[in-house]
Amino acid sequence: MAPVSVDPDGAALQALRAVGLRVTTPRRAVVAWLAEHPHSTADAVGSGVREQLDSVSTQAIYDVLAACTYAGLLRRIEPAGHPARYERRAGDNHHHLVCRGCGRTEDVDCVVGARPCLKPVDDHGFALDEAEVLFWGLCPTCLAAARAAGEVHHHEETVQ
Ligand SMILES: [Zn+2]
Ligand SMILES: [Zn+2]
Ligand SMILES: [Zn+2]
């Protein structure tokens, strides 16, 4: 069975079993790694997992991410203009802040909790099940860099 090092506490194994997925070493490694590194791209997952399992191909990483996302074990977010990111925090309706500068991504709880947490003025008869909420802006690091470069106007600075 799997080397203990990729999933030392067995949490990934339990999570895979709980959603009825066959337990494989690459799946354990990906799920365990993402628990420690939320909002990672497939490339980052591949690099991280290959530090532990050097035999895992990029295609295998993509296959694991797709299977685990489909099973509801992982959540995939796709900020426009950025590669898709994956995280273990799936199944709740939390939202994200994304930095336009560096892509840094942070979780924010939904104030409503259940989806859809926003309702349109006119739903045109649709049965709505989700409002995709993504907050865009500049993280503190990028904001400081933009100010240093004189790219942020005075009236925006005074709001802070
Ligand atoms: Zn940033
Ligand atoms: Zn998140
Ligand atoms: Zn919400």
Image (spheres, helix red, strand yellow):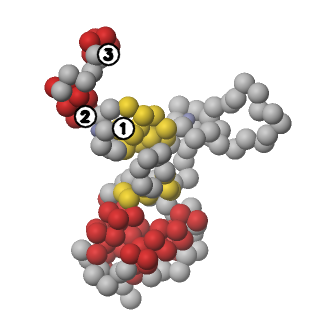
User: Does 159 appear above or below 84?
Assistant: above
Helix, strand or loop for disc 2 = helix
Task: Identify the image quadrant of the N terminus.
Answer: bottom left
Which one is earlier in the sequence, the residue at label 2 or at label 1? 1
Q: What residue type is labelled 3?
A: Glu
Q: Position of residue 102 (x, y in %)?
A: 30, 43
In percent of the image, x 78 and y 42: which residue is there?
127
Q: What residue type is labelled 1?
A: Arg
Q: Quick one: label 2, few (<14), some, or many (20+) residues within 10 Å?
A: some
Q: Where is residue 10 in the image (x, y as percent from the top left)?
A: 38, 73
Instruction: Tell me where residue 50 sits by quadrant.
Output: bottom left
Quadrant of ligand 1: it is top left
Q: What residue type is labelled 2?
A: Cys
Pointer 1 residue: 100
Q: Does the residue labelled 1 lie within 8 Å of ligand 1?
A: yes
Pointer 2 residue: 142
Helix, strand or loop for disc 1 = loop
In percent of the image, x 39 and y 70: which residue is there?
30
Q: Quick one: label 1, few (<14), some, or many (20+) residues within 10 Å?
A: some
Pointer 3 residue: 156
